[in-house]
Amino acid sequence: MDDITDLALQAKTGNADAFALLVRRTQGEMWRYVCRMTDNQRADDITQDVYIRIWKALPSFVATSSARTWMYGVAHHVVADHVRTISRRRRLLENVGRSATPGTLEHKFSLEGAARSPRDHAEYTVIEEFVTQLNTDHRAAFVLTQVLGFSYAESAEILSVPIGTVRSRLARAREALVTQIEAAEAV
């Protein structure tokens, strides 16, 4: 059993110190996932919501998979709820005849990493923008497998879909990215 799963099982029994350590050990990676799936401006609040929901859901954690995989499943649902709320709010504003504030729904995608040359940074920024333009399901499969390194099986569990669905979403994400890159290079 890994350390994160052990901490989750301890926290499940009401051990607040174990939960605090669980949060400290996973918070950076969880924040980066939330940020990649939503936007920088709301990532802190959404990540906090993720941990609140994890705390409330701990009694249902049975350790049939790793706690990390289970936690990302919870995070996926919190992010999906957030995206639905934003979409409803935007539709409401459009129906009322107002337009959303510029940048409100702007998505950011940033990776931690080594220093890049200005050219690499510019190319990287373009790729980040292309990833943010993927539909939510495809972006989730791409970020989980290609950025965070989850296996297809873990990603399927996180997203509550079959492995084949993860594979097809990832394939569609890759196709969309290739199309976007080719179109950008043609200009």
Image (cartoon, rainbow, N blue to C red):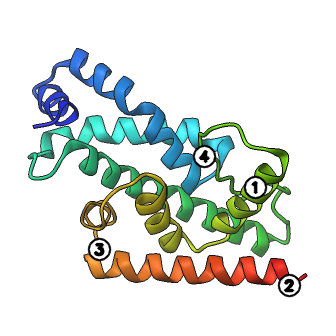
Q: Quadrant of the C terminus?
A: bottom right
Instruction: Give percent across and percent down for residue 17.
Output: 24, 15
Residue identifier under label 2 = 186
Q: CA distance from mark 4 to mark 2?
A: 26 Å
Q: Residue drawn at (26%, 51%), measured in percent from left and top?
A: 69
| Disc 4, SS | loop
Q: Are marks 2 and 1 in contact (CB under 8 Å)?
A: no
The amino acid at mark 2 is Ala
Instruction: Give percent across and percent down for residue 39.
Output: 65, 50
Mark 2 or 1, which is nearer the eye?
Answer: 2
Instruction: Give percent across and percent down for residue 176.
Output: 62, 81
- The tag earlier along the polypeptide, 1 or 3, is 1
Residue identifier under label 3 = 161
The amino acid at mark 1 is Thr
Badge 4 local density, few (<14 within 10 Å), some, or many (20+)?
few
For residue 106, say whether it is visible. Answer: no
Q: Are marks 4 and 2 in contact (CB under 8 Å)?
A: no
Q: Is 8 placed above or below 68 here?
A: above
Residue 111, numbered circle: 4
The amino acid at mark 3 is Val
Residue identifier under label 1 = 125
